[in-house]
Image (tube, coloured by chain):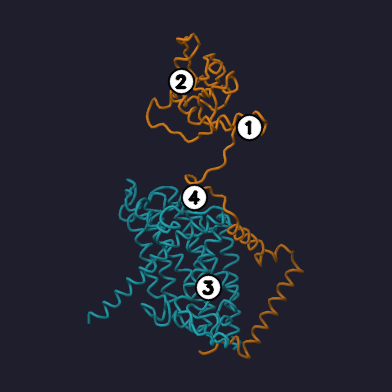
Amino acid sequence: MDSCGIVDGNGRFAMMIYALIAVIIVGLVWFVFARGLVQTVLMTELLRGLLVTQKTTLRRKETIQFPDESLPVSNRFRGLLALRRYPNGEERCIGCKLCEVTCPALAITIETQPRDDGSRRTTRFDIDMFKCINCGLCEQACPVDSIVSTPEMHYVVTSRGQNIMTKDKLLELGTALEPKLALDRQLIHEGEG
Amino acid sequence: MIEPLLITLLKIVAILALVMLLVLYLILAERKIMGYMQGRVGPNRVGPLGMLQTLADGIKFLHKEIIIPVQSDYLLFMMAPMISLICAFTVWSVVPIALDWVLADIDVGVLFVLALTSLGSYGILLGGWASNSKYAFFGAMRSMAQMISYEIALGFSLVPVLLLAGSMNLTDIVLGQQGGLFCWYFLPLFPVFIVFLIAALAETNRAPFDITEGESEIVAGYQVEYSGFIFAMFFIAEYANMIFVSTMASLFFLGGWLSPVEGVSWFSEVPFSVPPPVWLLLKVFFFLYMFIWVRATFPRYRYDQLMMVGWKVCIPISVIWIVVVSLMVMGGLL
């Protein structure tokens, strides 16, 4: 078979008949029944649905490739807690226990004692991260801006006991993040945070 | 004596390797395209652009324990995925990739294909029954009802093709469509073409006809008790069937390996030509993309809606078109 029937003389005739029949049927259905039926027969709504997904493929992707990328974090973000120091290296905390009192989850345990120079300091400052609900009330209660929420949100414990943030760990975190923490506090204070 | 056997074996290996490679990347392509259609990027961690993702998954399947339920029928439970996989691979023996590029050039190719695709549903039925689990059983029952309904539509939608081609040999059917884009059968048989595509979606248990799996209703249907590599066998069979049905659609309606610009004088001036298997591959990719596209777009049919579409829409349309095409062939119009 070197040529099919459709394109030669006879075939062209067949095509025209096809087109005519199709137009008549579609027109009749349109007039006699409702528009909805034509939509069903021609699957216009299905095609419109297909178009939606096809358009989405060309749109910008929402994926954030997590370990490589991360979402922007607000400077008011309430992540891990930390204890700050003054610029001269002195720890800010004066052991007033306001945070311990205000903590709704009873996550903070503080013991205090006078230091050699007579100032009141904590000897124990433990935060149980299992209990902590990251509400930030301790930060609000602190009169010396010592205990603060940090933007640090990726933390993990691998064995029992690591969930307790001791005073050393809190101070270490606060010292490490101090430039960021100080800047954030300043921005919040100026109303730009 | 031994030489033709060896060549046949080599051909079999080549076809299976090609199918497995296609399956490997079809699974990845599906996940990628579905991701893109949902505003995600899809798997991209294993290898460049996630190219090794499916391979990694396959290795994982091999490592997993095959859990066999105590209450199950051991023999049938193990046989079911094998039946699925064997049927999914065997049908490829009659598929012509280009002129004379076919393993078994038999004159009842269409019947062979229909027979083996029906046989493949035994894998699902036996798998669901042998699992002795209620969701697996539900899945198998649904699958049977669906397969039987849509096999009729599938068979009927192929009758006009056979009428036009005057042959059941797949190579002859393709050769009957020579003469460029407007000679392909999808044009005179457009309604049947659509019915074939819908029935093909249902036959391969793809969305929106995937009520046999229906993960939100019956967990995973017939696959629910399968794990490890016997699950992977079902999985491979499903995707091999998908590629196969796409190939069938290309052969029956889109002129197989024939070029769409065949016979157009302007294109015969072009110094290079696309090899025939590449045309077939492009058409297959088109249908596969459609399958994935439809899956990403439409929600699953309810069981009664599925039956309604099968019996009240697809079968009448194909039957009417059989009559129309028969009359036109008798009248010498086609």
N-term mark: 1 or 2: 2
Q: Residue most toward the right?
A: A31
Q: Is residue B79 left or right of residue B215?
A: left
Q: Are dots 4 and 2 on a single chain? A: no
Q: Which residue is mark 3?
A: B156
What residue type is disc 3 on?
A: Phe
Q: Secondary structure at mark 1?
A: helix
**Residue B25 vertical placement versus A182 (above, below):** below
Alpha carbons under labels 4 and 1: distance apart: 50 Å
Q: Position of residue A107 (x, y in %)?
A: 50, 21
Q: Which residue is mark 4?
A: B215
Given residues A141 and A31, the one toward you in this image is A141
Label 2, residues with CA under 10 Å away: few <14, some 14-19, many ≥20: many
Label 4 vs label 2, nearer the camera: 2
Q: Which residue is mark 1?
A: A187
* Chain A pictured colour: orange
Q: Position of residue A100 (x, y in %)?
A: 53, 17
Q: Secondary structure at mark 2?
A: strand
Q: Are dots 3 and 4 on a single chain? A: yes
Q: Are dots 4 and 1 on a single chain? A: no
Alpha carbons under labels 1 and 2: distance apart: 29 Å
What residue type is disc 1 on?
A: Leu
